[in-house]
Image (cartoon, grey):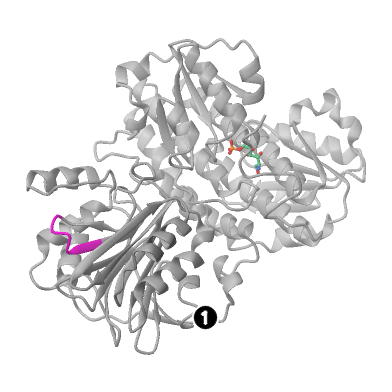
Amino acid sequence: MCGIVGYVGPRQASDVLLGGLARLEYRGYDSAGVAIASGGELKVMRRVGKLVNLTQAIGKTPVPGFVGIGHTRWATHGRPSEENAHPHADCTGRIAVVHNGIIENYMELREELAQNGHILRSETDTETVAHLVESYYDGDLALAVRKAIKRLHGAYALGVIHLDEPETIVAARKDSPLIIGLGKGENIVASDIPAVLEYTREVLALADDQVATVSAGQVIVTDLEGAPVESEMLHIEWDLAAAEKGGFADFMLKEIYEQPKAIRETLRGRMGADGIIQLSELEMTPGQIASIDRVFILACGTSYHAGVVAKTLIETWARIPVEVQVSSEFRYGDPIVDDETLVVAITQSGETADTLAGVREARNRGAKVIAITNVVGSRVTRESDGVIYTHAGPEIGVAATKTFTAQIAALNVLALKLAQAKGILGQERIAALWADLNRIPDIVEAILADLDAIEECAAAYTDVYSTLFLGRGVGWAVAMEGALKLKEISYIHAEAFAAGEMKHGPIALISDEVPVVVVATQGHTYEKVVSNIQEVRARGAEVIVVATHGDDEIKRHAEHVLYVPATSELLSAIPATIPLQVLSYRIAKFRGCNVDQPRSLAKSVTVE
Ligand code: AGP
């Protein structure tokens, strides 16, 4: 995710900005830049790639000055490039803006600004903010920013400077974090606490719809109408290492907790006011979508499990047959795909060698390929016909967590789009499903707020050697993902099966030494799953069940029950996954494993 730092005070702004941005490097980024009020001019320097490129450029051409804003960009709109890197300036070159978040109505704003004679130089949503501030500026930067942000739909944390007010930064936020580190005779605006810890531990946390005017000696916070308001003050106790992880012990745990946000961001802006699902990335007319007669999904590992969930969603809602294959099999097989097949390549990193080879193979055979990825500018985005981004922010832990649930969110959108374009689901049904889908982030929050049962369960199974995971329908995909998470971070053997397959062989493995994890949330096969539980218990296994709140009966069949709130069956994959992620995490921690960097694994598997 992008990082913001702003400085006003007696130090050289470039030193504080570069130091602060370095503290935010762990968040991931693809370009960096600063804008500094320097000798009566606004100097903007931006470089693609690592921060060291920007640091070297400033080393060669110093930018002296005491007020400035800086940014590390994780691309969301437009590829990683110098033109798209922040800060963005207005037409006069006197205003500069840094931004985290997504401006949903930026296309509309760009058109309006262009019609009014503004020259936009980048592909970003952010640049519209600089020009909006320019158009509203009349001698009061805070007022111009307030007017500009009233025009924005979406999420933002903003830092804005103007040469006419060279001792001030105006900062504002909505749905994207922004804090102000309060120093003695200096203040630092930042998107995250590590950037300010070198200078202060006293922090003002801006709330949504608050605007701060920050100078070296004071910070004035108002609401959107300009009325003074109070902000929360915090004293930070964490050291730097803890702060980078937001106070969490590991990146994996932090990323588990970031899932509500990742899902919300991925769903954001996907439903139009006209009730039409917005997925222009498909670059297909409704007629072309209606003619798709087959979907082929390619992916590896966790992304493959998201594909298995998608098969059920697309087949049920859009009535299009879906095949899901691991990319390494697809690329060397003789797949039946042609120009009426939609191929969906799912890869959080966008760099997985087998999936990329599968994409090439599918396109050679005439198929249209849509990638679902979390990384803007990754290779899959250049090799596919269209890209749907998950907006999960960078995932640093090697084990995929938030990218998995964000993939499922994006695949829900795709399945609804196909169902709508094909006319299989009526408008009312689509609206109801959309409303249900938008409740999932709150459900995930509720699960993460009450982890006692998982903690207790993890403590009981820290020393097991082998486990089985069972489920049916989307619960089978969840079981596969649960088993993968456990094996990759705790090194406990874990195998998943479709619960109905158990009696065809795996049941021979059942004993009192092999705990069985069963996904038994409510659905049309619930009774069958309960029968499977009874079969394994009859052979001595201890059972851990993921079940729906209110299902008290299930307690009679299990040693541990991990409850999740009720959802419709097809939407249960995300909620049911969360307890299994946390269970794996807790077991791995009890065993002393390095959950962020498990042995032998890599975040991007760029070789065969
Ligand atoms: C997930 O926890 C694993 N690290 C791994 O299975 C991963 O999902 C797989 O390598 C695919 O990666 P991708 O999504 O980047 O293509």
Q: Is residue 59 magenta?
A: no
Vertical comparison of 504 with 238: above or below: above
- The residue nearer to you, when weighing 292 against 191, is 191
Asked if residue 210 shows in the view, the reply is no
Kindly identify the amino acid type of the residue bearing the numbered disc 1. Ile
Q: Give the magenta part as a residue range.
A: 91-96
The tally of labels here is 1
Question: In the displayed structure, does residue 550 sit left or right of residue 66?
Answer: right
* Residue 595: image location, x then y, percent: 71, 55
The residue wearing badge 1 is 236
Q: Quadrant of the C terminus?
A: top right
Tell me the residue at 30%/70% (across/down).
68
Disc 1 is placed on an element classified as: loop
Vertical comparison of 317 with 126: above or below: above
Q: Is residue 94 magenta?
A: yes
Q: Magenta region's main secondary structure?
A: loop
Tell me the residue at 58%/40% (across/down).
573
